[in-house]
């Protein structure tokens, strides 16, 4: 299995969806089977999901994101998450990541409980696109990625960023969001 070093891949703070796209792209180009990769979108209908161990937060503090995106790799006995924004390892086992990143959901008020959308990497690499408009009023221009926005390889099948993080929708790729506890029962 291909080793993954965080520093060997494109990264721009606040653009986790593009970081995940480039990581999946690079892994597939490097020989990882696309079927071994999935993209996980974490959010909820109120767009206020709480995460722990995020590098942007003070040590031990919770961080509230409107959404967050990571890459999951599963092959044989390997099941791991790659999150550029975590204080945890890169990669780190999926169960450790989930336990160290998400508070126990039953202890949170319902508006903060996480949902997750799982998207096959091959679909994400073909369909994802973003015009970065969600960050236009939030970041200065010099903090945007230095490369052009990612456009769908199949424009007729494109899925915009806002559609992926809308946890109420089932998308044209068949992906739908489920409560975090449905995918990872240990966080109930």
Image: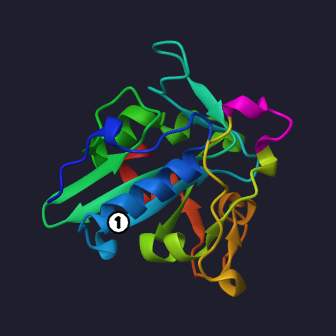
Q: Which residue is mark 1?
A: 37
Q: Is residue 72 left or right of residue 164?
A: left
- Relative placement, left or right, of 40 versus 166 is left
Q: Nearer the viewer, residue 101 or 13?
A: 13
Frontmost residue, 164 versus 181: 164
Task: Assess whether residue 42 is covered by the magenta stretch.
Answer: no
Location of the N terminus by quadrant is: bottom left
> How crowded is the residue under tag 1: few (<14 C-alpha within 10 Å), some, or many (20+)?
many
Q: Secondary structure at mark 1?
A: strand
Residue furthest bottom in the image = 156
Counting from the top left corner in percent of width and height, residue 183 is at: 43, 60
Q: Which residues are magenta?
A: 135-143
Q: Residue at x 83, y 41 (%)?
A: 136
In reply to whether residue 141 is colored magenta, the answer given is: yes
x then y, percent, for residue 97: 35, 40
- Residue drawn at x 51%, y 77% is 123
Q: Is residue 92 above or below residue 184?
A: above
Give the quadrant of residue 12: top right
Q: Residue at x 48, y 33 (%)?
A: 103
Q: Nearer the viewer, residue 125 or 106?
A: 125
């Amino acid at each position: 299995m291909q080793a993954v070093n965080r520093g060997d891949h494109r990264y721009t703070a606040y653009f986790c969806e593009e970081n995940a796209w480039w990581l999946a792209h690079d892994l597939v180009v490097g020989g990882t089977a696309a079927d071994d990769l999935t993209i996980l979108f974490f959010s909820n209908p109120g767009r206020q999901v709480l995460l722990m161990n995020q590098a942007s937060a003070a040590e031990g503090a919770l961080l509230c994101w409107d959404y967050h995106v990571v890459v999951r790799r599963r092959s044989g006995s390997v099941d791991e998450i790659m999150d550029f924004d975590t204080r945890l390892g890169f990669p780190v086992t999926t169960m450790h990541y989930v336990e160290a990143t998400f508070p126990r959901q039953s202890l949170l008020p319902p508006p903060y409980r996480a949902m997750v959308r799982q998207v096959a990497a091959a679909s994400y690499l073909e369909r994802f696109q973003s015009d970065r408009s969600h960050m236009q009023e939030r970041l200065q221009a010099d903090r945007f990625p230095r490369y052009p926005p990612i456009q769908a390889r199949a424009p007729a099948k494109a899925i915009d960023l806002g559609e992926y993080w809308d946890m109420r929708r089932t998308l044209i790729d068949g992906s739908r969001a489920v409560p975090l506890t449905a995918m990872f029962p240990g966080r109930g």
